[in-house]
Amino acid sequence: MIYTAHYTSLLGGITLASDGIALTGLYFDGETGCPPCDAAHKKDLPVFGEAMRWLDLYFAGHEPDFSPTLNPTGTAFQQAVWAILRTIPYGATTSYGTIARRIEQKTKKRMSAQAVGGAVGRNPISIIIPCHRVLGADGSLTGYAGGLDKKEYLLGLEGVL
């Protein structure tokens, strides 16, 4: 069963999704990609409290020193990319190509920046799994499910822009 809660941020509404134990999704209102949320049940869960406390700290301009329990669903490749995203420090950025090279080093298989971009774009727990910290090879802002304006704001909040 999928449970949801709603959070109001400086960037608008955010839907939080959970399997009852861990956070499985974080979606800006109006963002596509939250199909199970349509049939979800609203419930007050400890993980929602943790996620909201994390978001409160983050939107206040602080780097949270904890993470709510996360359980994003994806392929092994997506999970590998999302694990790398979680290592990008607050206030720092990386590129799709850099992530591809890290995966190549680990797997000894050729990896494209485009494949990494596809996995980054399917990150179901944006902000907490910081896909907004990934830029194009030339440092340009590239796609973000919540919109480039939100990506720019998040990077500005972290002092990157």
Image (tube, rainbow, N blue to C red):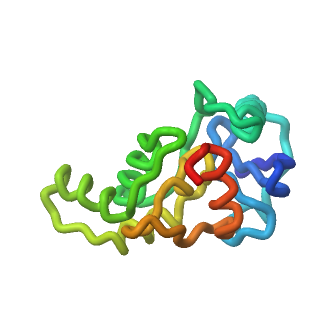
Q: Residue furthest left?
A: 108
At a point 59% along the width and 31% down the height, the residue shown is 67
- Residue at 39% from the left image edge and 60% from the top image edge: 95
Identify whether 65 is placed above or below 128: above
Which residue is at the front of the view, 19 or 88? 88
State the image coordinates of residue 35 (x, y, percent, origin top left).
70, 68
- The answer to whether 81 appears left or right of 31 in the picture is left
| Residue 78 coordinates in the image, percent (x, y) | 41, 59
Q: Residue at x 71, y 58 (%)?
A: 27
Task: Choose between 143 and 14: the one closer to the eye.
Answer: 143
Q: Is residue 93 left or right of residue 4?
A: left
Check the image and report above or below for 138 versus 48: below
Residue 11: image quadrant is: bottom right
Residue 4 point in image, percent of width and height: 79, 49
- Counting labels gives 0
Up the image or down, 45 lies above or below 114; here it is above
Q: Quadrant of residue 128?
A: top right
Residue at 31 percent of width and 64 percent of height: 97
Quadrant for the C terminus, please: bottom right
